[in-house]
Image (cartoon, rainbow, N blue to C red):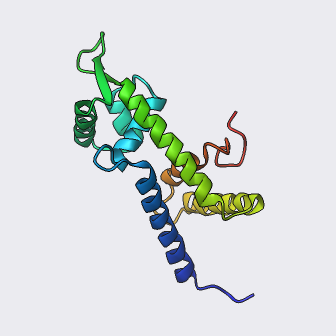
Amino acid sequence: MASIDLNNLYHALHNLVKQMHRAAHKDYCMKGVIYHGQAKLLAEVSGNDGASQKELAKKLDVRPSSMTEMLSKLENNGFIFRKQDQKDQRVSHIHLTDEGKKIVEHIEKTKDEFEEKFFSALTEEEKEQFFVLIKKLCLGLENDNNNDYKNFHHCREHHHRHFHHTHNYDFDGRDKF
């Protein structure tokens, strides 16, 4: 078998990721109603009902000022509401409204449909092989002591989010349960 040019392989993977994100966001983000960053935030609020603004900003790796702006837009659209902490009035807890819950349901449904469509070109064996290869690449970056990826966690979290419906594996391949 001929050796593949690593630059071409890297750019092919990079191109796949860009196309994947564009297609997914086109499918499950409702233009004029909700955008990608807001969809991620709503999903996070849905999974962490009552989280504080500070907790959400940390979890999504967003500046507090940006989080304030994002939450204000979602609140103005009627998708979330804030409830002040009874013990510390400076802290607000974020909750979904009924309309916000409907948006999250729509996003989850269309995301699931997109993932089914996206991976339909692969056999079950190819999906499993692909998953193993992605894990190897991410772990290689995490374990490389010679670059800035030593504490790189985004790959793990990002990959897990995209596979959480069909796999409940931690990144070492063990069941999370």
Residue 88 in the image: state x and y as whole percent. 27, 14
- Where on the picture, by quarter, is residue 118? bottom right
Residue 75 in the image: state x and y as whole percent. 26, 30
User: Residue 113 versus residue 74: which sits nearer the camera?
Assistant: 113
Q: Residue at x 48, y 35 (%)?
A: 105
**Relative vertical location of residue 146 with respect to residue 163 in this rendering, above or below:** below
Residue 78 in the image: state x and y as whole percent. 28, 29
- Where on the picture, by quarter, is residue 40? top left
**Relative vertical location of residue 116 with respect to residue 41 in this rendering, above or below:** below
User: Residue 4 versus residue 139: which sits nearer the camera?
Assistant: 4
Which residue is at the far right? 125
**Relative vertical location of residue 140 with respect to residue 49 in this rendering, above or below:** below
Which residue is at the far bottom? 2
Q: Is residue 91 visible?
A: yes
Q: Residue at x 23, y 34 (%)?
A: 72
Q: Is residue 1 left or right of residue 7?
A: right
Residue 3 in the image: state x and y as whole percent. 67, 87
Q: Is residue 15 left or right of residue 175?
A: left
**Relative vertical location of residue 158 with respect to residue 50 in this rendering, above or below:** below
Q: Is residue 139 visible?
A: no
Which residue is at the far top? 86
Q: Residue at x 36, y 47 (%)?
A: 30
Quadrant in the picture for the C terminus:
top right
Q: Is residue 113 left or right of residue 124?
A: left
